Image (spheres, rainbow, N blue to C red):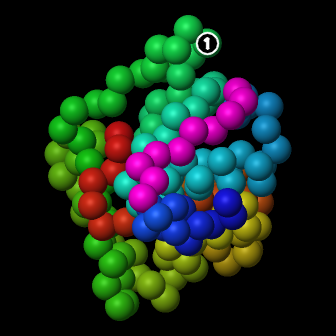
């Protein structure tokens, strides 16, 4: 699998989830590989697939929780918080209740940052304009960056797993 479209094809053929084999130690992964894994986890959840995986991911609580060696989940999903993105022809409107009160963040589609939030290919290197444009989204915890790679965590219209 290399993109969101591959995951959409899985859901259309009747799959309800995916299982990743191996143990993913995110602190030890290369930048491109790390961002690709996070995008895979983000997009699988975004198209409605449950993800079963094992790994160490630190503070990335917006992902489906990994399993520990004993089979238990690394954390429990928080209740009540959501991250919803509505896509319009000229904007992305993000409504975020992950931290209690509702926040609305509007992103103009003409901004390079909008391309990162909408990106469906995994592991792509950011352009200098995109990298500079992501600072505001990072302040709102809507983007994960590693080196010259980045991925938006808002995935689709609907509720995001928090």
Segment colored magenta: 14-23
| Residue 80 percent across, percent down from the top left | 18, 38
Q: Is residue 15 above or below residue 12?
A: above
The answer to whether one can see residue 135 in this image is: no
For residue 107, side relative to residue 67 (left or right): left
Viewer-closest of 21 and 108: 21
In the rendered image, the quadrant that contains the N terminus is bottom right
Give the residue drawn at x 58%, y 32%. Answer: 53
Q: Residue furthest front?
A: 13
| Residue 128 percent across, percent down from the top left | 73, 74
Viewer-closest of 81 and 104: 81
User: What residue is disc 1 on?
Assistant: 69
**Per the image, is 49 magenta?**
no
**Per the image, is 15 magenta?**
yes
Query: Dividing the picture into quarters, in which one does residue 12 lie?
Result: bottom left
Give the residue drawn at x 17%, y 45%. Answer: 101
In the rendered image, the quadrant that contains the C terminus is top left
The answer to whether one can see residue 42 in this image is: yes
| Residue 133 percent across, percent down from the top left | 58, 71
């Amino acid at each position: 699998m290399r993109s969101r479209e591959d995951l959409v094809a899985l859901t259309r053929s009747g799959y309800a989830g995916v299982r990743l084999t191996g143990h993913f130690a995110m602190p030890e992964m290369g930048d491109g590989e790390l961002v690709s894994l996070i995008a895979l986890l983000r997009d699988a959840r975004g198209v409605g697939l449950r993800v079963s995986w094992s790994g160490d991911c630190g503070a990335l609580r917006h992902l489906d929780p990994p399993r520990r060696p004993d089979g238990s989940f690394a954390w429990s999903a928080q209740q009540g918080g959501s991250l919803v993105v509505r896509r319009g022809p000229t904007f992305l409107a993000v409504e975020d209740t992950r931290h209690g009160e509702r926040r609305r963040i509007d992103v103009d589609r003409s901004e390079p940052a909008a391309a990162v939030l909408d990106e469906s290919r995994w592991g792509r290197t950011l352009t200098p304009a995109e990298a500079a444009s992501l600072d505001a989204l990072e302040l709102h915890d809507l983007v994960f960056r590693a080196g010259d790679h980045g991925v938006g965590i808002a995935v689709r219209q609907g509720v995001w797993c928090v």
